[in-house]
Image (spheres, rainbow, N blue to C red):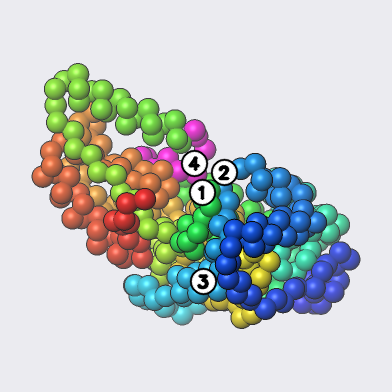
Amino acid sequence: FLLSALSPSEFGDTKPKRRGRTRRTIVTSKRKAKKREYARLQALYKRNRSNCFNSLFEKASLSPDLDDRDVFDFWSHLFTRSSPQNFKNDSPFILSDKDITEDLFVTPQEIYSARLPFSSSSGPDGASVKTLNKIPIRCRCKIYTAFLLLRWVPSFLLDSRTVFLPKKENTSKPSMLRPLSISSTMLRQFHKVLAKRLMAVLDPALDVYQFGFRQMDGIAEAVLLFGYMVQSACTNFSTIAVAVLDMEKAFDSVSHDAIFEALQKINISPVMKDYLKFTYTHAKTFLCFNGSIKSEPVRPTRGVRQGDPMSPLLFLLVFDQVLNAIPDYEGFHFENKRINHIAFADDLVLVADSMVGLNNIINRILPALTWSGLSISWRNR
């Protein structure tokens, strides 16, 4: 019933998925490069005027020399490379009648608070937010509850397309692109409901000095705290040793096994744990860049799906395990507390009262980073 009810053919404004052959264009002159850029802007204007305007007036832009095949090869390898195998694959949770409690059922209030903006892009199934809203809320409650209890989602909803956005002006390397996964609007709304539930459990348990994706002005809190610590060191003529760690593709490299293991340590329903494991085990994505689509989908074995409402929380969950590896006896004394780190998502500042203490912290955190699939970027940017 679910497959027939949610089939893409049932949606009125769906569009067939485009399949394009990857094109390799070699730019031999500035004139040809300008023609190619003009053609790209014309095509973008026809598809999305807002994105076309942003590409003209924002600093981030693509270099005409950046080739589709290079982008697909780089990111396919990054998404599918092996990661540390730490998680013991236990047998799936067997759901019995006594395990089906009221808190598992999705309510109309949850769906109303998780409504999507009309500007949200449609996923590979072609269903827009307008189409999603045509489905009565009570029907969506039953569908989302069924997904959760079954710990299953049909593949046409689970699959996504991944587009790549430039990080800076005239981006010429695939590594300087930011991937954004766009799944079905129905799946995004369902995951937004689950994200609110997960955040209610996770927020009180997260590290107190992790300021990313929290219900606060995290940037201001982190900057003020670090500023006060430096000011205290200068005022009291005390030593403060600082190390700023830059993670290499953190959101795209985190180990799926680390996610599954971290989920086992928090107090959420086994049903949700099994559902999240299913989504990361079976999800596929189509790589899209500059009008071209990679012919074969990619099944990621690491990384969280940027653009999915659940992804920031799952990353924080893993990174919290990394922060727990920092020894309590090291740090900088500030206001009768010992502070040894300040984090904003994957941005990490380590603090100690001596270089020896700072080295001890780094030596303890490196194995934890390896366990999580993360690594430090040693390159100068």
Element assignment for label 1: loop
The percent coordinates of residue 26 (x first, y second) are 58, 71
The percent coordinates of residue 195 (x first, y second) are 58, 53
Q: Distance between the Cα atoms at labels 3 and 1? A: 18 Å
Q: Please, what is the three-letter code of the amino acid marked with disc 3?
A: Asp
Residue 311 sits above or below residue 276 on the image: above
Q: Distance between the Cα atoms at labels 2 and 3? A: 23 Å
Residue 170, can we see it? yes
Disc 3 target residue: 70
Mark 2 or mark 3: name the one nearer the start of the chain: 2
Q: Please, what is the three-letter code of the amino acid marked with disc 1?
A: Lys
Mark 3 or mark 1: name the one nearer the start of the chain: 3
Disc 2 target residue: 59
The percent coordinates of residue 106 (x first, y second) are 69, 56
Horizontal placement of 87 versus 141: left or right?
left
Give the quadrant of the N terminus.
Answer: bottom right
CB contact under 8 Å: marks 2 and 3: no
What span is colored magenta in the figure?
204-217
Horizontal placement of 45 versus 95: left or right?
right
CB contact under 8 Å: marks 3 and 1: no
Residue at 70% x, 50% y is 51
